[in-house]
Image (spheres, coloured by chain):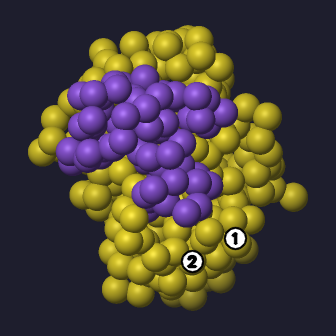
Amino acid sequence: MRSKFQIADRVMESRLIFGTGGFTSLKALEDSLIESGAELVTVAMRRVDTNARGSVLDVIERAHCDVLPNTAGCYTAKDAVVTAELAREALETSWVKLEVIGDDKTLLPDGSELLVAARKLVDLGFTVLPYTSDDPVLAKRLEDAGCAAVMPLGSPIGSGAGIRNPYNISLIVEQSSVPVVLDAGIGTASDATIAMELGCDAVLVASSVARARDPVSMARAIKLAVESGRLAYEAGRIPKRLYASPSSPAEGLAELS
Amino acid sequence: MKVIVNGEEKVLREGETLEGLISSLLKDHRGVAAAVDGEVVPRDRWGASRLNEGQTVEVVTAVQGG
């Protein structure tokens, strides 16, 4: 029996958190979401579109998932806090994926604004899941601020570049007493497996599924990859060596010449 | 009176409430939140929240993202 995954008081069977951005249709989103087996699903908050047909919320409800609103698009702590408050009001959840972006080319987090926003939102009673850089010191500060998890990036959002600094992710895993969710940068299944083998508690994906040629199959591939990676992590990998270590016995070898 | 609603100027009757404005935009208020001049107004106060000339109103909901 694999261990379960828990953030705050929410226990989940699935270690895959699903981002809904980038799907070309709600149908593609729904099919992929169901295939992924995810239980926690992100959304963004935007101005209402009075002509919109169907809602991402209906998809999430039909899939029996919980919604995790984000603060994507916010560049200041103040905007992120108001966006989180709007999300809490609209969606009746105090959970928030906190994003405070510092640069529009890389979409890398603004560490100082992120920490200010995290502290404020924790004070306001939110369950805060910050999207952060792979800096172990910042991750520690966020944990100390009372965040319910830390979500370091593997590489920039939507880049599909995988995990650029696995050593930093390992340091974050080692030091953290809250769950570590690898967020951003996953390009394909093997990236998710590596995240889990490094000891991350979960992986958050969006673009890698949404922009795959076949999103439903990629959702399944990444679901299995997360499970494989977790199993391998719990099983314990062998150490890497420079030289060979024979796997067949040296004794009893026939004398042939 | 004029107010800015989601970035566009709108002419509303004097004394219009936030509730009245949102009802004119949307039939279904599920999953919707509003802020006036950058402050979130809880749903149970929409009816009592009278809008004033020049105010900025944001009405948001969940969309696909991140």
Quick one: SS at disc 2? helix
Q: Residue at x 51, y 74 (%)?
A: A54
Residue drawn at x 76%, y 51% is A12
Left or right: A79 as drawn, with respect to A172: left
For the point 61% across and 46% down, which residue is it? A91
Front-lying residue, A177 or A231: A177
User: Could you tell me if residue A85 is visible in this image?
Assistant: no
Q: CA distance from mark 1 to mark 2?
A: 8 Å
Please give the letter of the chain rendered in purple: B
Mark 1 touching mark 2, by CB under 8 A? Answer: yes
Chain A appears in which tint? Answer: yellow
Q: Is residue A177 above or below residue A185?
A: above
Give the total number of marks visible in the rendering: 2
Q: Residue at x 66, y 39 (%)?
A: A93
Q: Callout 1, which amino acid?
A: Ala
Pointer 2: residues within 10 angstroms few (<14), some, or many (20+)?
many
Residue under label 2, please give it.
Answer: A30
What amino acid is found at the position of numbered circle 2 in the picture?
Glu
- Whether residue A253 is visible to the viewer of this picture, yes or no, is yes
Name the residue that disc number 1 marks.
A63
Instruction: Give how far across and how far down residue A69 sits, in percent.
Output: 52, 45
Check the image and name the residue furthest to the left: A105
